[in-house]
Image (cartoon, grey):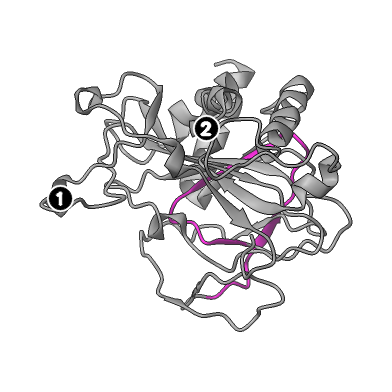
Amino acid sequence: MTAQAESTDAIVRQFVADGFAIVRGVFSRDDLDELTADVLRIARGAYPCPSLQPVPAELSDEAVLRNFLCIHQPHFVSPVIQQFVRHPRLCDVLSRLVAAHLPWWDGRVKCMQSMLFVKPPGERGQAWHQDEVYIPTRDRSLCGAWIAIDPATVANGCLWVLPGSHRSGYLYPQRPHQQPDEFDFADESCGFDDAQELPVELNAGDAVFFNGYLLHRSKRNRSEIFRRAIVFHYCNAWSLLPWEIKPGERPATADCRRVIPVVGADPYAWKGYEASLSDVWLRPLRTDNGR
């Protein structure tokens, strides 16, 4: 067995046991430069999209980035982001991780979401939550790939995780939190002991992969620098995706088709795909929104 194979096996073991795994240097400096340039193109409204209108050319890059916290589904409008959804280094890891808990999984993966976070200085985070609450999968295979564009530190609001909290497959109840200066408007998951939480500090280009049932949160950006990150969500390509149930559709067979295959052939390709620019939307700043 090669050193690379041993390293990959260790990543898989940690992901299955702890619910998350850090992989260093997934994106190169050239990748980050290309991504950073595209973030500005998106933010300036360079791509035709109803929710992303052009901004005055005289605005500085920093002023433009301070206009929003997150853009949802930028891969529907940006060919650069769609290229990164399928980045070879990501796919190498995803083909081993996403459904590693399933004995007969053949490594096929699909992507259903991208999120481009900017998180300027002073912006709040999001309280404890599990991504599976928002993106349900059939087989607990939801996997987030959170890639740092800037260094992610405790000071600027990196992710915090609760190792092992994914194991039971339990979705914790949610309630309004009582920390409006720290977290955004979203409810918090509750009913567990978070004493063992860990910060996930990353260098630019590093990635953390985490299971959809893993409890995680982020805190306010208390630094003077941005905390930009690109986040992709994937799952087993064989898993139906009941993200929304259309009128007359049975819950057991609901399958959202706003997906793109990234590893292996899509077993449901015959259903076609659904995506439009109306799926791209902006999460604004300081209006009780943040992460």
User: In the rendered image, which residue does mark 1 sit on?
Assistant: 252
Q: Residue furthest bottom?
A: 178
Q: Above or below — where is 64 with respect to 122?
A: above
Looking at the picture, tell me which residue is in the foreground, 70 or 230.
70
- What label does residue 75 carry, if any? 2
- Determine the residue positioned at 39% across, 28% down: 260
Q: Residue furthest top?
A: 2
The spot of residue 66 in percent (x, y) is: 77, 52
Q: Give the dominant element type of the magenta stretch: helix, strand or loop.
A: loop
Q: Amino acid at mark 1?
A: Ala
Looking at the picture, tell me which residue is in the foreground, 46 or 56.
56
Q: Above or below — where is 247 with respect to 34?
A: below
The spot of residue 85 in percent (x, y) is: 53, 28
Dot 2 alpha-carbon crowd within 10 angstroms: few under 14, some 14 to 19, many 20 or more: many
- Determine the residue positioned at 68% across, 43% down: 229
Query: Is 148 inside the magenta-drawn segment?
Result: no
Looking at the picture, tell me which residue is in the foreground, 75 or 27.
75
Q: Amino acid at mark 2?
A: His
Q: Secondary structure at mark 2?
A: helix
Looking at the picture, tell me which residue is in the foreground, 205 or 113.
113
- Determine the residue positioned at 86% across, 42% down: 60
Regarding residue 99, the answer to whether it shows in the image is no
Q: Secondary structure at mark 1?
A: helix
- What label does residue 231 carry, if any? none
User: Is residue 219 shown left or right of residue 110?
Assistant: right
Q: Which residues are magenta?
A: 193-217
The spot of residue 176 in percent (x, y) is: 51, 80
Query: Do the numbered discs 2 and 1 sit on residues whose CB atoms are within 8 Å?
Result: no
**Which quadrant of the figure contains the N terminus?**
top right
How far apart are labels 2 and 1 at the CA level?
28 Å
